[in-house]
Each structure stands twice: as structure tokens, then as C-alpha cells.
Image (tube, rainbow, N blue to C red):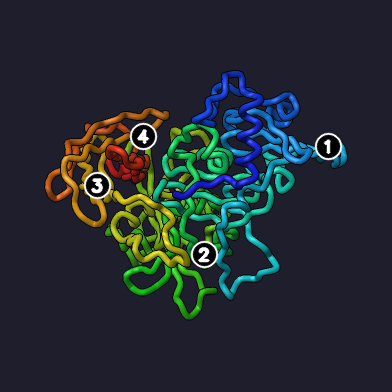
Amino acid sequence: MKKYTPWWVIILLIISFSVTTCRPAEPTSISVGFDYYEMDSLFNGRYLALGGEEVLGPAISPKFNLQGLDYQYTASALFVYNPTLPLGQQIKLAPIGSEMGITEYTLPVENPAKGIEIYPGFLEFYQSLGGGGIVGSPITKVQYNSERGRLEQHFENLGFYQLDSNPEIRLLHYGAWMCANLCDFSTPINSEVVLFRTAVQPFVDQINTLDPEFIGRPLANPHIASDGKIEQIFQNVVLYTSNDNLAEIRFRPIPSILGIPSERGIDHAIPDHFTAYLEKHKGLNYVGSAITPYARQSVEVFRQCFENLCLDFFPNKSDSEQIKPSPLGYLYRDRYYREADFIILDTPSSEQTYSLKVWEENPLIPPNSPQSIGVSIQKDDQPINNIEAALILKLPERINIRYVMPPSQEDGRTSLVLNPIDAPHGTVIAYDVCIYPEDEAQTCVSESFLIWGNP
């Protein structure tokens, strides 16, 4: 991943840091320790109003001045003070997103006058930060970043992301990306800016029509499926279309594709609470006919499957948490998704020479059952032996467990059997696999599997 700082910022920061830092200047280094800084009083009120360190990250530079304007970096943003503007408009966030050079591809069937839509799942967070006046306009559509296992969308001033393993919406570290050459700050891998490949987004209008709670977050960018159709995998459903009619969007019958037993030709009764849920979340016209009866699966869950998705009912949970679509998209992705078939416009920006491939023995396992994780390590398309990988298992309640996998063998492969996981049906178990080759950049892959069925 190539990072850069504009020349004018470099010159200014060299001067500014040598003057304003508390420690003596070192002629051989202009590195700045982020833990030495607090938000300047000029910016601190706005900084705290936007959520402070919890939202925008810590201050990673002192305040500095350029051509009459004051600046200060946080991990996620660059604050700017312009005294010539009217009161109330003097403090803004700089448009770091616009500096990234990401270009957005627009399909011919889309209406350019509409502009780029904000992903509905990000809209509430966008508005809570002050909307366009603070965040700026979107500069990309929502994208799935498979390298980091997250959904993300770039705006003029800030970048949003949401991990597969955590529904909380966070900010990408724009400030750390822009100030990478000067600010001595280590960005956590989850928040790191990756200049991703820009993918065609034929389903963007459908995403903005349907409730994100119904279809779930995207788990992959649109790609060419084995039948030649363009498809996109979401947590709960799979959308597809054909090249000759991009405006016609359909749903894959994933319960049948995944082999879930069905009873067709029977008019299965649908409970009122499922019908009400589907009406509320705009999904009634998309699920298809019921293909299984409404039946108890265990003490904690009832289920009914339709042609295009399954619904689960948890009677012991709160009202807002009782009904959820089954996240079958994870299983579909693990079985059928081929990343090489992204519909992309640009080449990958990553400069890493190491590559990781990760897989599970079973993409879905019953509760309290062991799981085996396999890893293949290559460099320049050749298997590499004697490399250790770390596996970080992300359990519910934000519990992370770190394992060190056995060194890779001559074929570049290694594997590890995880201890049985006691988690409810429908729980997504996310994990990261990372390698730390000597004198090389850290390489990580994020994956997940599903707790499904009864013990």
C-alpha cells in the first residue's frame, strides 16, 4: 500500500515539528511520537463534539500553520482553522479522501445526476457526525475489502468501515495515512487505509432500496459466478443479474443451493410475526414461497426457510432481537465465491509479495464442535516453508484468543485445530490469520465461519 504526504505538508511539518515539539530536535529524524500530543485548544471543542479520541483517534501531530491556516492531525482526520471564514465555519476537516486518487466507476444504467449514494447502513453514523458539512460527500460507493474483511465507503473528509466481526461503524485512519512519512503512529490493521481495487457496482440501487437488516452487509464485491451471471453475496441473501440486462436484479435460492431440506408443493403456514417482519423490512416480495414448515430447531430457536432465505425466531431474546435472517451468505461465500473473478477496473495497489490463502475444514459447524483452519503461504507464487502464522480468533463479547500455528511445511501449508466453541446457532465466528516475515510487511487475511445447527 503506497502512502504519501503532499510536498507542502512535508516542508511545513519539518519546520513546525522542530519548533513545537517538547523534545529536542534530532537532525537525522523528523519522527514524532503521537503520545506526546493533545488536541490544541483551538480544535478541542469540535474534536470532543465529534466524539473525541473514541471516534477520531488520538492527536498524532502538534498544531501547525501554513499560509495563515492552522492544522492538526488526528489518526482519522486533519483539522483546519481558517480565520477568514465566518464564525461557525472556521473549523473544518480537510478533504483527505479526495487526495487518495480513488476514481469511481459508473455503470451506464445509473443516473449520473443522482450522484453517489451513501450506504444505508452508514447513513445514521454519517448524520450523527454532522452529514456533508463534516464528513463531506461520498467519493466511492460502498465496497467490500476482502483483504481486511470489512465493508467501507470513502467520503471527502472521512472514511467509514464496518468489520465482518463487529457491527460497530468506525473511521479509517485518513490522518495517519496522509501523515505517514512524518507522524510516528502505528495504525491498527483494522483501521488501515488500503487503496483498493475499484469494482463495478450493479447492485447499488437495490442495496439502497432494501433494508440492510434484511439483506445484511455485503460479504464480497460483485463478481462473475460460475454460471456467468454477475452476483453479489450479502450476509443473508445473494443477488445476481445478467450482463445483457443489468437493471433486472434477482435473488439466488440459496437454501436449496446449500442443500437445506425442503418440502415443496405444500402451502406452508407463515407465522404472523414473520410476515410482519418481512413487511417492515421491505422483504415480503423477495423471499419467495415458504419451502419448510415453521419448526423448532432447538430450545433457543425456531426456523422457517423460504426460496431465497431462512428466518430464525429466538423467543428468549428481546423484541428487537427475536427475528433475524439466517446468515447463509457466509456459507455460500465459502463454497462458491472466487475472488479472482472480481469485476475490477484497476490493478491491486498492494505492494506485498507474500500471499495467504485460508480455509476452514467446515464453513459451518455445530456448537461445541472443533474446527480446523488451514493456511497456505506463498511468496511470488511459490510456497514458502518454515513461516509461522498467528491466528486471532474473535469470539463473542469481544474476546480475542491468539494462537501460533505450526511453521509451514515445504508445500507452504500449515493447519491448526481450534478448541470447541460454545456459541449459539447463527453466530458468526471471525478470525484473522497474519504472518510476520522478517524485514517484510505484515500480511493478514480475515475470514469467518458459522455456528449452525444443534450440538
User: Mark 2 highlights which residue?
Assistant: 201
Residue depth check, mark 3 versus mark 1: number of the one nearer the observer: 1
Question: Disc 4 on helix, strand or loop?
Answer: strand
Question: Disc 2 on helix, strand or loop?
Answer: loop
> Which mark sits nearer the N-terminus, 2 or 4?
2
The amino acid pointed to by label 2 is Gln
Q: As drawn, is 399 to the left or to the right of 284?
A: left
Q: How far apart are marks 3 and 1 (CA)?
A: 57 Å
The amino acid pointed to by label 3 is Glu
Camera sees residue 340? yes
Q: Residue 394 carries which label?
A: 4
User: Mark 1 highlights which residue?
Assistant: 83
- The reply to whether discs 3 and 1 touch (Cβ–Cβ < 8 Å) is no
- The reply to whether discs 2 and 3 touch (Cβ–Cβ < 8 Å) is no
Q: Residue furthest right?
A: 86
Quadrant for the C terminus in the image: top left
> Which mark sits nearer the N-terminus, 1 or 4?
1
The amino acid pointed to by label 1 is Pro
Camera sees residue 216? no
Judging depth in this view, the residue of 111 and 272 nearest the camera is 111
- The reply to whether discs 1 and 4 touch (Cβ–Cβ < 8 Å) is no
- The reply to whether discs 2 and 4 touch (Cβ–Cβ < 8 Å) is no
